[in-house]
Image (spheres, coloured by chain):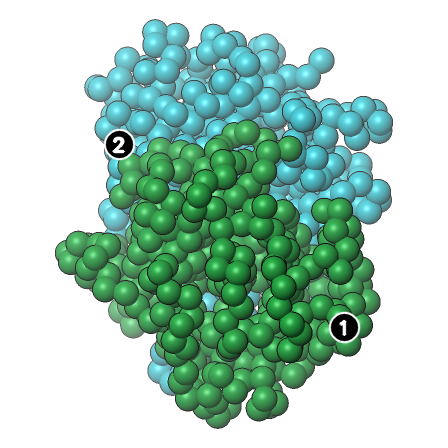
Chain colours: A green, B cyan
Amino acid sequence: MKQVYINGVGNISPQKTFDNALFLDEVVAVESNRLKCQDPNYKDYISGDMARRMSHIIKMGIAASNICLKDAGAPLPDAIITGTGLGCIEDTEKFLSTLIRNNEEFLTPTSFIQSTHNTVSAQIALLLKCHNYNFTYVNRGISFESALLDSLIQLRLGQATTVLLGGMDELTDNSFTIMNRLGHWRRKPVNNLGLFQDKTRGSIAGEGAAFFLLSTDKTENSYAKVIGVDTFFKPLDTSEIQSRIQQFIQKQNLSIEGIDLVILGMNGDPTQDMNYELLRLDLLRNTRTGCFKHLCGEYFTSGAFALWLAAKILKHQRIPPVVLSGFLAGTKMKNILIYNHYRNLDHSLMLISQD
Amino acid sequence: MSQRVFVTGIGIISAIGNDVNETLSSLISETTGIGEITLFDTIHKGKFPLAEVKLSNDELREMTGNSGRRNLTRTALLGMVAANAALQASTIKDLTKFRTGLISATTVGGMDRSENFFKEFLQDNRKGKLIDIVNHDCGDSTTRIAEYTGINGFRTTLSTACSSSANSIIFGAQLIKAGLMDRAIAGGSDAVTKFTLNGFNTLMILDKERCKPFDEHRNGLTLGEGAAFLVLESEEIVSRSGKMIYCELTGYANANDAYHQTASSPEGTGAFLAMQGALNMSNIKADQIDYINVHGTGTQNNDLSEGIALERLFGEKVPPFSSTKSFTGHTLGAAGAVEAVLSVLAICNRMIYPNLHFSTPMKELKIQPVTKLSQDVEVRNVLSNSFGFGGNNSTLIFSKYD
């Protein structure tokens, strides 16, 4: 079976992650229940005329994919595969609101055209003049992980040698308000860096776009090897999660002792984080664990941020202090497991390794 | 690796029928599902025709045993009907026996209910019933269909505009070929919404009459709704069960036009590449294709671009082709799967469907669609095209299995 490497990354997130030379050297802390992206200067990536018509998710996607491709030596990818939980909601809301306010009259097409879920991957193809395979997955908390699975299949079946993989979601005022009414977010502003200490209900909303250039060739710039991905829905209890994790690791001929770091998707809501805590007391009791949602917030494709984090940790052989929640001594890190879930429904596992 | 992938079940609901039998009789009697708007509430009633599924949400709820569940979206309900029918046709009793997944597709998911929610929400963002918005996202209908049918393995959803469910069929087949799954229920579902009807209206590509694909005087598409699913199974489990095989999925490809967000390129680059890619995978020569179920929306742009791609690829010998959107309307995210089911039926029932409402050949093309129903003809290989916004072009090839 062909090996798959991460040869480039590009990440726009609520942290200053768009500069690949840095790695969480400075951490953004805000007092809020909502984290907004630290945007690069989009004019560096998109002409002013085009940018004016584009929603935030399209700009983030184009810039992040651009940074990623540059990092990987600018190959024309054999496939572009993305995942997004809610897609282009800014344009969707714009068209829907005008439609309702104007009772189906006096509408213009731009926001409708840009509202389809595959707009970002299509725009990237258009800018690259890339005629290859172009898929977009939209399944809530496993949208990005589905895109990763498709990428691995393409590469392992020999249908592609390079894949541009991305995960992105944008947060709008309306989507924030709606999810707030559903009780997803903290009622009071919280310092994101203190998210896990302050144990009250709700998480903090987030957003972001992270891209990866996956390849069957290892290069000097390779961050890590992608070992596998698995997803499952609504497990009965923690012991089912535990056995899914064990099966997943065993399939890769590894045991939990061989995992140097487990990145967990804790979001600060005690009702959501229970399973992670129980795992830490049991399967992961002797394993170093870290977390990331205090840096990027909670959103459907936060797994893409986690994969970026894991890839950077392996490449730099350094865990930023803000990520580590335990205090185990550091040795050389080889294998990192990511375990994440979205509201206890969609669960995902990703494993990457330094070759 | 290369596991062969077989179709062992089909399910469909659209404007031309609530099941496979009704669909077949509409096709044979050449009865279109396009007509005046009856159920759907819009100010455009009387201005544009639609291809509606002739069942209200209450009737769909009753049909699926969901009478009490007011929160289900029309997209989910249509999907349940079609996916369940596909499983029954495939005589699957024990879903846990093999690794079984659900790969669905939709473009607007629960938009029908989001439209209700936003009416009140826009006045006051503390208002609007939350039950009307929690099913907005595309993954919702997939979750509901999985729950309803009992498919408890891997599930995911694709959304690539009007090629969405052709792509879910491709991904289902890929999972089987990669050995990750034994069986995939793959397809898609989309309900008519104000969002899409008005969206296409702003682009001025809705025909005021019933759509006339590939006609010189075509004026746009007719919006439809529906859902369709295929049961795809690996060679290995099919040979073990010895069940009936409808046909084989021998080829597929996705390519990108990379020309414009909504318009197709004048050379039909993406369409050409998708068809060529699928032919290459299937190892079938161009002259062995007996029928092409074209994307054929009826818009000026699509039909010209697709027609040019057909002439480029097949030269003087373009196989008989027709757009069944003249029957079903354009079912958007469901279209790829709806037309895949019709392609399978063409093989199984030895027939080629007419392209309805056609009268004048296009000036720019040498070719014209089939206008008469052919029955009792040899249909060995069918090529089906589905193209979407973002230059997303997909082709599937189904082949007779003896």
Q: Tell which of B145 and A287 is nearer to you.
A: A287
Residue shown at the point (53%, 60%) measured from the top left: A317
Residue shown at the point (54%, 57%) measured from the top left: A314
Residue A223 seen in this snapshot = yes
Residue flagged by tag 1: what amino acid is it? Arg
Above or below B222: residue A109: below
Q: Is residue B271 left or right of residue A259?
A: left
Residue shown at the point (33%, 41%) measured from the top left: A74
Looking at the rendered structure, the secondary structure element under dot 2 is loop
Q: Tell which of A280 and B14 is nearer to you.
A: A280
Residue flagged by tag 2: what amino acid is it? Ser
Mark 1 against mark 2, which lies toward the viewer? 1
Say which chain tag 2 marks.
B
Q: Residue tagged by mark 2?
A: B265
Give coordinates of residue A238: x percent, y percent.
Answer: 78, 70
Q: Residue tagged by mark 1?
A: A285
In space, the residues marked 1 and 2 are separated at their CA atoms by 58 Å
Looking at the rendered structure, the secondary structure element under dot 1 is loop
Q: Which mark is residue B68?
A: none
| Mark 2 Cα shell of 10 Å, populated few (<14), some (14-19), many (≥20) | many
